[in-house]
């Protein structure tokens, strides 16, 4: 069984919700990313979404764009990001990992090679926001060959297309909570709950909500009806604020403590 499926099945038995933080690999640097992943696991993450830095992101808001720029200055690539993930596994990370990457880095590495390396690195799922459903057949075939779930994204604006998008889905469905790019929002869309319930009914798979969730109040609200919640910009911003502490080995434990406290408060009930 894919570890993502196992995690959702276990959470369902317990009546829990998957907490899925998003982290840009290589920000502040790859060594720190390993410590950040382990810290988020300690803080209660059920699975982690690894953002691959990219120079021309379509879905990322300013916070994640800044983190990607910093990671690119550290020469982080898809290959080095996968090495980072593998190192985190070797150092004690046991929860599932997903990649959030645009299509071009996969093409640059070569699709088959990319999936081979993802498999070696222990990646369990992949989200490709700029790959349309109608053009994903080759990637889907590779995902099935290597046992790595290709996670579809659906948005409030794509309701009429949801049945088609989810008909061959595996793992879970990523529901985009708001219009526009990622980023912290003061309010969630009023139609989000009904949309998520619709997606769950149509797909029969867990529905995970992402984009815009940044407060404990929003986290609790979405947890009422979603099977998982992604928190991206708020986590990346918290890391950004402690960047100097992370980069100094003597103060990294302090930065980890701060991130752990922030995360535990965010998902507290």
Image (cartoon, rainbow, N blue to C red):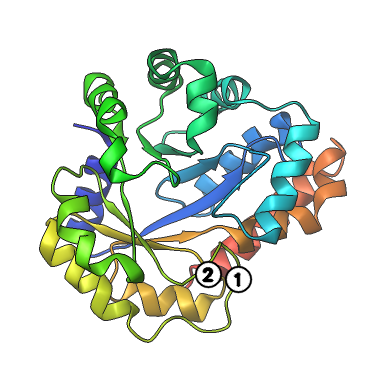
Q: Quadrant of the C terminus?
A: bottom left
Q: Quadrant of the N terminus?
A: top left
- C-alpha separation, residue under disc 2 versus residue under disc 1: 4 Å
Residue 138 is left or right of residue 219, and the answer is left
Give above or below for 160 relative to 164: below
Residue occupying image coordinates x 54% and y 24%:
82
Give above or below for 41 relative to 217: above
Identify the image quadrant of residue 131.
Answer: top left
Looking at marks 2 and 1 on the same chain, the residue that comes earlier in the sequence is marked by: 1
Give above or below for 186 relative to 255: below
Q: Which residue is mark 2?
A: 212
Give above or below for 70 relative to 237: above
Residue occupying image coordinates x 29% and y 79%:
193
Residue 221 is left or right of residue 257, and the answer is left
Q: Are marks 2 and 1 in contact (CB under 8 Å)?
A: yes
Q: Which residue is mark 1?
A: 184
Q: Residues within 10 Å of mark 1 (few under 14, many from 20)?
A: many
Relative image position of residue 142 (x, y in whole percent): 28, 22
Relative image position of residue 32 (x, y in whole percent): 72, 36
Residue 244 is left or right of residue 40, and the answer is right
Tell me if residue 128 can be seen.
Answer: yes
Identify the image quadrant of residue 252.
Answer: top right
Residue occupying image coordinates x 25% and y 55%:
11
Relative image position of residue 156 (x, y in whole percent): 34, 71
Relative image position of residue 112 (x, y in whole percent): 38, 14
Considering the numbered disc 1 on the image, is that residue within a helix, a strand or a loop? loop
Q: Residues within 10 Å of mark 2 (few under 14, many from 20)?
A: many
Residue 205 is left or right of residue 62, and the answer is left
Considering the numbered disc 2 on the image, is that residue within a helix, a strand or a loop? loop
Tell me if residue 89 can be seen.
Answer: no
Q: What is the number of the mark on residue 78?
A: none
């Amino acid at each position: 069984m894919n570890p993502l499926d196992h995690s959702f099945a276990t959470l369902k038995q317990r009546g829990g919700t998957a907490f899925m933080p998003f982290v840009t690999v290589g920000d502040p640097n790859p060594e720190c990313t390993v410590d950040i992943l382990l810290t988020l696991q300690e803080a209660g993450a059920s699975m982690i979404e690894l953002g691959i830095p990219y120079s021309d992101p379509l879905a990322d808001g300013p916070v994640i764009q800044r983190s990607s720029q910093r990671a690119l200055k550290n020469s982080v690539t898809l290959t080095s990001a996968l090495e980072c993930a593998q190192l985190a596994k070797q150092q004690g990370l046991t929860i599932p990992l997903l990649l959030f990457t645009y299509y071009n880095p996969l093409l640059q590495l070569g699709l088959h090679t990319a999936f081979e390396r993802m498999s070696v690195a222990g990646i369990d799922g992949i989200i490709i926001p700029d790959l349309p459903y109608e053009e994903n057949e080759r990637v889907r075939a590779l995902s099935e060959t290597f046992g790595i779930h290709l996670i579809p994204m659906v948005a409030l604006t794509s309701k009429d297309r949801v049945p088609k998008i989810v008909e061959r889905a595996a793992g879970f469905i990523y529901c985009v909570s708001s219009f526009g790019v990622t980023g912290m929002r003061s309010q969630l869309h009023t139609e989000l709950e009904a949309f998520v319930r619709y997606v769950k009914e149509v797909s029969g798979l867990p529905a995970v909500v992402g984009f815009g969730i940044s407060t404990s109040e929003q986290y609790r609200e979405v947890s009422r009806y979603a099977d998982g919640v992604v928190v991206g910009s708020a986590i990346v911003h918290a890391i950004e604020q402690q960047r100097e502490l992370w980069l100094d080995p003597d103060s990294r434990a302090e930065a980890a403590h701060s991130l752990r406290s922030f995360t535990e408060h965010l998902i507290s009930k």
